[in-house]
Amino acid sequence: MINKQQVIRLVALGCFGLGIAVNDGKFTEVKAAIVEHEQHEIIDNSKQDELLAQNPQTADNNKYFTGVLQSCNLAGSTVICTLVVKSKADQNMTFKCQWDNVTKLYDQYGNTYLCNQIQVGNAKGEDSAKTRFPQGTPIKVILTFNNIPPQISNFDTFEVHTSGFHFLRFNNVTVTQ
């Protein structure tokens, strides 16, 4: 792997090789451009890490994928839950919503709320959504539930199902308004 100083030297040598004189001002510009590029890489990596770590609630209860629940927000009578899923191997996965009525929220009073809409990456649907999951790549999953009573502040259990009877389970899910 080439470090920053080696890149600066290669750029400077490349400029000399093309007959372009690199004075101290140009060399400083090259160094500044490299530093700026590195800062953007750090910021991009930080955003990805932040996306995965906004909520510490993680589900790792199956051998195919893991999930991190970011939030469940109540707006009127709709709860929108956002999670990030990582596959443990390259695969296509279908997340279920209304298909078989398996993706559900359970409140502490024994009531069950069914998923109304799902978005997995760019795929969106009412019954299900399917996308390709490259191994270890975070994919955002957004689930919408309607007709939720406004007094609900948390759910006992949140289960997100895929085809093949695999699921992620989150317990004691807090709902923010």
Image (spheres, grey):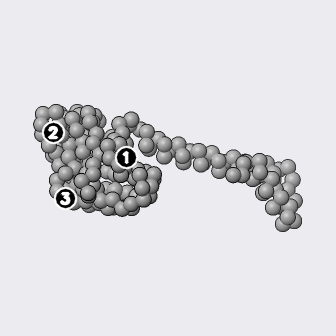
Q: Amino acid at mark 2?
A: Pro
Amino acid at dot 3: Trp
Q: Secondary structure at mark 1?
A: strand
| Amino acid at the residue labelled 1 | Thr
> What is the secondary structure assignment of the residue under circle 3?
helix
Q: Nearer the viewer, mark 2 or mark 3?
A: 3
Of tags 2 and 1, which is closer to the observer?
1
Q: Is residue 42 left or right of residue 155?
A: right
Query: Residue at 54% across / 48% down in the picture?
Result: 44
Residue at image point 35% right, 49% down: 63
Q: Which mark is residue 66?
A: 1
* Marked residue nearer the N-terminal end (2 or 3): 3
Determine which residue is flagged by label 2. 149
Give the label, 3 or 1, closer to the camera.
1
Q: From what the image shows, is residue 56 above or below residue 138?
A: above
Q: Position of residue 74 (x, y in %)?
A: 25, 40
Q: Are marks 3 and 1 in contact (CB under 8 Å)?
A: no
Nearer the observer, 64 or 86: 64
Q: Quadrant of residue 71?
A: top left
Describe residue 81's horizontal placement relative to residue 147 as left or right. Answer: right
- Label 2 – label 3 distance at C-alpha: 23 Å
Vertical side of 88 occupied by 175: above or below = above
The x and y percentages for residue 28 are 79, 48
Q: Residue at x 36, y 62 (%)?
A: 92
Q: Which mark is residue 99?
A: 3
